[in-house]
Image: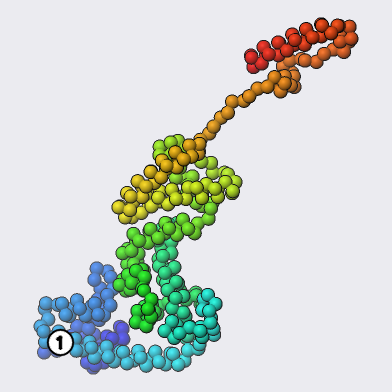
Amino acid sequence: MNITQYIVMKLLKLTEGVYNTCDSYIPLNFIIYEKKGMNLNKFQSMDIMILKNPFHSKEKKDQFLTLFCDAQKIRRRLCKFVRYWRWKKAILYSNTEDLIGTPLSELKEHLKITLLQKNTKYTFRISDLLNIWMKSLTYTSAMTPQPKFPRNPYIGLDFQIHHLYQIYFHIRFYTNFNIPIYLLNFFKCDFNVQLFRESMYTLLREDAIKSHLSDSTVSVLYFDIVNMINGNQKIFKNRKMKKNINFSGRIKIVKLLKPILYFYLFGILSCNPFVKRKMWRRFISSVKRFLCKHPAFGRLIKRKRCFRISTDLNYLANTNRINISVDSSDSSDNSDSSSDSNAENQYMRSAELLSIV
């Protein structure tokens, strides 16, 4: 039993959950109502069970609405008293600077807000809360949007829904900040993370791709480029990339192919069919321009070996394929003409062996 239902029972002086007499019938279960397995709040339940119920007359609807309003007034007074008591009892967290080191005393009052959490009052700068909120809603894991509830950076606990309402209305009515589209849609989804993810998934996916390209390391982007080239051999005309190259080479390749990787990731991962088709066409055209500008990129070029007589003779002699040594005893007896003829014969023999090898 919630507080509103308890107040209604006290107003009617009831001990059970239904007021039923000969003249009137008041169903107290309109405070809590489930529709298709989804719990609705008391205002939605009131609208469905009472105001839009064709089986109740106008007098009955007015009676139920008056009863509900009286219960809400009493509940509001009790909540106001409890809130005042909690704020008086809470301690002030001793932070004199915002999250970027600017003294809070130098900021105007409408640029600051104080939140109560765990019996402690925390003072924040509005721009810091906006950054925390946006980072939480645009959080990604491997280019997959995984929005989370924003957290208090001082204690590491999630803000509660009433904190988000307090921040949102302060930004809207007391500051000149433009509310980002993510915060506006999160407010329209009643700060439900799952509903927000379903309604904004297309934009969140595109922001996830941009964050991946801007925040990922060189090694991660290099392996994305390798997968892009090896997975699209027809577009890259059978070019291939090795995975094990030095870091300086990876930096050069990432710098050279990062614009093409941008079109490729959007062309295969975007949830918007128009953006996906447009980016894929730009990916193909950018690859064609790149290959025209760098025709030798990703190709294995083999060069023929240029043989020289002196180096080849040394190679054949070291491998014992020919014997070009000259005997010392024979050299003393032979004349100069015979030594020249022997050298010429040896040279011709080496040339024949080279042609065979």
Q: Position of residue 155 (x, y in %)?
A: 51, 77
Residue at the image position 39 percent from the left and 46 percent from the top: 283
CA neighbours of label 1 inside 10 A, class few (<14), some (14 to 19), many (20+): some
Q: Quadrant of residue 60?
A: bottom left
Q: Amino acid at mark 1?
A: Asp
Residue at the image position 43 percent from the left and 76 percent from the top: 159
Report the number of discs. Answer: 1
Q: Report whether residue 314 is seen.
A: yes
22 vs 249, left or right, is left
Residue at the image position 58 percent from the left and 44 percent from the top: 245
Q: Position of residue 326 (x, y in %)?
A: 82, 13
Name the one closer to the observer, 7 or 135: 135
Q: Is residue 124 above or below residue 334?
A: below
Kindly identify which residue carries mark 1: 62
Residue at the image position 89 percent from the left and 6 percent from the top: 333
Q: Position of residue 157 (x, y in %)?
A: 47, 75
Q: Position of residue 88 (x, y in %)?
A: 45, 93
